[in-house]
Image: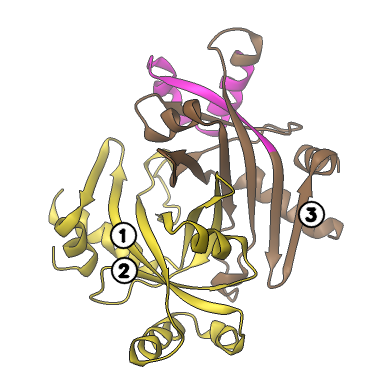
Chain colours: A brown, B yellow
Amino acid sequence: MDAVTSSSLRQLLATQPVAALATLHRGEPAVSMVPFVLPAGAAHFTIHVSALATHTQDMLAHPRVGLLVIAGAVAGVPPQAVPRVSLQADAEQMPPHGDIYAETRAQYLARFPDAAITFELADFSIFVLRPVSARLVAGFGRAYGLAGDRLLGWLRGTG
Amino acid sequence: MDAVTSSSLRQLLATQPVAALATLHRGEPAVSMVPFVLPAGAAHFTIHVSALATHTQDMLAHPRVGLLVIAGAVAGVPPQAVPRVSLQADAEQMPPHGDIYAETRAQYLARFPDAAITFELADFSIFVLRPVSARLVAGFGRAYGLAGDRLLGWLRGTG
C-alpha cells in the first residue's frame, strides 16, 4: 500500500461522521449506525451510546464488534469500488469520571456539538473501541490487511 | 409511522447503492460493504458476491445476517438523526440457472452495469436476502419496528 492510499483511507476515518457497527445480538450478527470519533493521534475510536439501545447491551454481553466506514459516493466510481475500511475491535465502557473521560467527552462534542444533551442523560455512556485488525479497500482489487503494530501506527497516522 | 415517513424510508432501499452487511465470522460479528438491489415489488434483496470473500463463506456457514442502509449526509441534519434502516435477514445462494436467475441478473445489471464482468467469473454467485425484521429510524426518537406481513408489505411498497 503506497503512502497516498494509506493516507487517504486513514482520512476516511478522520472525516466520515458515522460508521456501521456490527454486534453479536443473541448469537446473531446485527448492524446499526453510530457516530464515531478517531481522536487525533489515537489508535482507538470512541462512541457515545444509550443503555437503552440494543447495540449497547450487545457490547456489554460480547465486546468484540465489527466496524465499517465507507467513503461518500464519488461521481464516476462504481459502488463496488468505493473506498472503505472494516475493522474488528474490542469495545469497553468508560467510567464517567476522571481526566480521560473529560478529554474524550470534549473530543466527541467538538465533532458532534448537537450531542451535548446526551451527556446530560444518565443512560448514555462512552465506549472505547480498540481495533485488533483491519481490512482496507482502496478500489477494485486493492485490498490490504493490517494488524498489530502496523495497524496501530496507521490509525495514529504515524505508520 | 405516517405514510410520508414510511415511503421516504423505503425509498432509501430503492435508491442507496450500498449496504453494510453483518455476518457471523468464526463466532464474531463482522461487517463489510455490499452493493444491493431491492427489486421493484419484491420483499427481498439480492447481492452478487465472490466465494473468495469472507462474507460469502460466512453466509454459507451461518445464513442469518444483518443489513444496514444509511441515507446520504443531509446539510443541517446531525449524524445521529440521519435516516436509516437496519434489518435481520436470511441469506440463500441462488443456483446460477433458470428464469429467476436470469431475471435477477438482469435487475442487478440494470442497477450496476459495471458489474457485468463479475457475471463471467465462476466464483461469483447471487444471494437472496429475505428480511425477517426491520428497524426504521426516521430521525431523533423516531424509530419503528416491522416484522411479518407488515414488513413484507412495506418492502413491496404496498404496505
Q: Residue at 55% across / 12% down in the picture?
A: A95
For residue B17, which numbered disc appears in the image? none
| The quadrant where residue A40 appears | top right
Q: CA distance from mark 1 to mark 2?
A: 6 Å
Chain bearing tag 1 is B
Which region is colored magenta?
Answer: A102-131
Give me the residue at 62% from left, 66% from top: B53
Answer with left or right where residue B12 lies relative to residue A11.
left
In the image, residue A100 sits, relative to residue B28, either above or below, namely above
Percent across and percent down for residue A79 are 54, 70
Q: Is the residue at mark 1 from the same chain as the one at mark 2?
A: yes
Indicate left or right for A157 with A92 as reference: right
- Foreground residue among B62 and B152: B62
Q: Are marks 1 and 2 in contact (CB under 8 Å)?
A: yes
Residue to which mark 1 is pinned = B131
Magenta stretch secondary structure, dominant = helix
In the rendered image, which residue does mark 3 sit on? Answer: A6
Q: Is residue B64 magenta?
A: no
> Label 3's element?
helix
